[in-house]
Image (cartoon, rainbow, N blue to C red):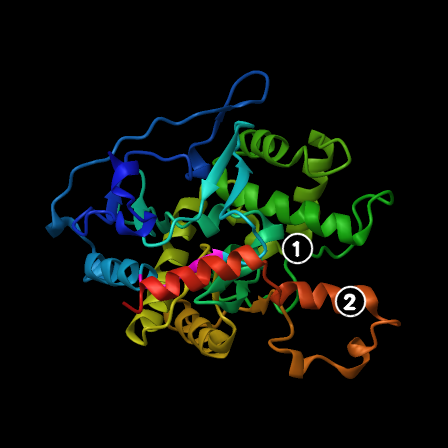
Amino acid sequence: MFAQAALEEDWVRFNEQREVIVLRDKDDEDPGQDRFDKDGAKKRNTSKNIEYDDAEFPAFLDGAREDLRAYNDLLNRCHIDIASLDEPRFDRTDDQGRTKSVHLHQGRHFIRRIFSRGSFHCNGRFYGGWWQNCPKQYRKYIRINRQPTVEVDYSAMHPLILAAEKGLVLEDDPYVLAHLINNEVSHQLQRKLVKAFVLTAINAANPDQAYKAFRYKFSAEFDLSLTRNLFDKLHQGFIETHPGLQDSLFSDQGIRLMNIDSQIAAKIIATHVASDKPILSVHDSFIVPKDDVQALEIAMREVSAEVLGVPLKFKRDKQFLSIDQLPPQYLDRDAHHRAFEGFVDDFSFSPAYDQRWREWEIRHQT
């Protein structure tokens, strides 16, 4: 019957009254509740939604439901696609090793905030956008209303939030240690290991849980054995470099920090919705059309300072916003062929994408 009706995919929408503020007893996204079997495999959490009364909302959630519905309305008036794809879909592998196909439907973007542990003070991040699960090799090709996009990422967000709460200023990269823990590990590799360690240790409730999570999540990423001895050396090196953050490790801080970064995200999103400017949230980073990147960076600086008392650092995923800003030496294709091609790829698009955009544009002009 649907095939005979010849329905267009973006004629099918979610109910406008579908709940956008969700409270759960527990959640897969809660790192502090990770449990592992004897073989080191992660046990899956089975979560349940909890009914609640709006009067239970904490003050910071005033107007949150209306804000989210306005955000969803804005997203569903935009064409959001990956310009390099011939078919509007990509495959992703979940943490259970299963491959799933994600279809980039237009008009059915639905974002909600999910709180965990039965509390509006735990988690609260924005979930539901396919861009959150988009493989990195595709994310730079995301276009919004045909405009190339730029992603701006808060740098070392959770360690810097913890430092700000303690009145500490970490001028340097918090993932760079004062010395190498192992002569066989390069500075670049050590930084990646330290980042993996810190994010795991902040989220875990104790060292044993942290080590199991560290090995489970990152074994496939590093070409070396993630032994307990290596884990302990990373721990020692971090607290020697940042003694003020020692008591923040193995303290189940993750779910609280996720709530703080969700408050920051909510304010940043609200400023863009008020200006009718589309923005895609990936928790600690944001994707916007290239013309809006400076406004985004102003908002990221001001909102983090408002919430934490100090502005957080951030960085762009693309350094150039147009061909006009490309340094002259990159225009010499013989001498700098690979660099030039890499830049052009950021802004190129497939004929199939162009066709999808034109069809969408025609439908929304009538």
| Residue 118 visible in the current orientation | no
Residue under the image location 60 percent in, 30 percent down: 216
Image quarter hosting the N terminus: top left
Front disc: 2 or 1:
2
Which residue is outermost to the top? 38
As rendered, which of 311 and 9 lies closer to the eye? Answer: 9
Helix, strand or loop for disc 1 = loop
CA gap, disc 2 and disc 1: 28 Å
| Circles 2, 1 touching at the beta carbon (< 8 Å) | no
Membership of 188 in magenta stretch: no
What is the span of residues highlighted in magenta in the rendered image?
Answer: 77-81
Residue type pointed to by label 1 = Tyr
Vertical comparison of 30 with 188: above or below? above
Residue under the image location 79 percent in, 53 percent down: 187
Point out residue 57 in the picture as x, y percentages from the top left corner: 18, 52
Q: Magenta-highlighted stretch: main secondary structure?
A: loop
As rendered, which of 294 and 160 lies closer to the eye? Answer: 294
Which residue is outermost to the front? 4
Membership of 80 in magenta stretch: yes
Image quarter hosting the C terminus: bottom left
- Residue 293 horizontal side relative to residue 191, left or right: left
| Residue 220 visible in the current orientation | yes
Residue type pointed to by label 2 = Ala
- Residue 110 horizontal side relative to residue 155, left or right: left
Residue at mark 1: 175
As rendered, which of 255 and 91 lies closer to the eye? Answer: 91
Residue at mark 2: 339
In the rendering, which numbered label is found on residue 217? none
Residue under the image location 19 percent in, 62 percent down: 63
Q: Residues within 10 Å of mark 1 (few under 14, many from 20)?
A: many
